Amino acid sequence: MIKTLTGRYDHVDKARNAMDDLIGTGIPREKLYFDEKANCVKVITPGDTEREVREILGRHEPVEVIERAMD
């Protein structure tokens, strides 16, 4: 199942670092969205990479991680 995972951070630098970390591990840029004003990183992820994405988002101390199923 394809989901979006959104990490919301209390500082733009944490969000930017999470984004850089995701890119560095090989997550395709077209699957990532960075909202600098909201300090959020959204990732479109299939089930096989979800655990890795959650781990990376968590490394950067998000305020919350929001999960949504995609149709």
Image (cartoon, grey):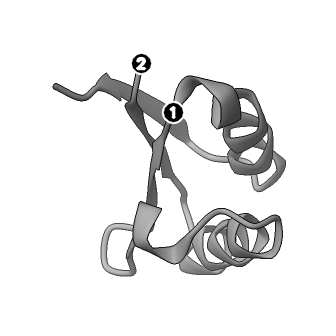
- On the question of residue 4 being in view, the answer is yes
Q: Estimate the spatial distance between the alpha carbons at disc 1 and disc 2, rounded to whole Å.
A: 6 Å
Q: Are marks 1 and 2 in contact (CB under 8 Å)?
A: yes
Q: Circle 2 sits in a helix, a strand or a loop, which is it?
A: loop
Left or right side of 46 for 52 = right
Quadrant that contains the N terminus: top left
Percent x, y of residue 65: 51, 34
Give the residue displayed 65% in from the left and 80% down from the top: 13
Query: Which residue is denoted by mark 2 in the rendering?
Result: 1
Give the residue displayed 54% in from the left and 77% down from the top: 12
Q: Quadrant of residue 27?
A: bottom right
Q: Which mark is residue 34?
A: none
> Counting residues from the N terminus, which is met first, the one under dot 1 or under dot 2?
2
Q: Amino acid at mark 2?
A: Met
Left or right side of 44 for 13 = right
Percent x, y of residue 3: 39, 30
Circle 2 residues within 10 Å: few <14, some 14–19, many ≥20: few
- Above or below — where is 7 with respect to 70? below
Percent x, y of residue 70: 24, 29
Give the residue displayed 74% in from the left and 48% down from the top: 61
Q: Circle 1 sits in a helix, a strand or a loop, which is it?
A: loop
Q: Quadrant of residue 20?
A: bottom right
- Above or below — where is 42 with respect to 36? above
From the viewer's side, name the closer residue of 21 and 31: 31
Percent x, y of residue 60: 76, 56
Count of numbered circles in the view: 2
Give the residue displayed 62% in from the left and 71% down from the top: 19
Query: Which residue is denoted by mark 1 in the rendering?
Result: 46
Left or right side of 34 for 38 = left
Q: Amino acid at mark 1?
A: Pro
- On the question of residue 32 being in view, the answer is no
- Above or below — where is 61 with respect to 51? below
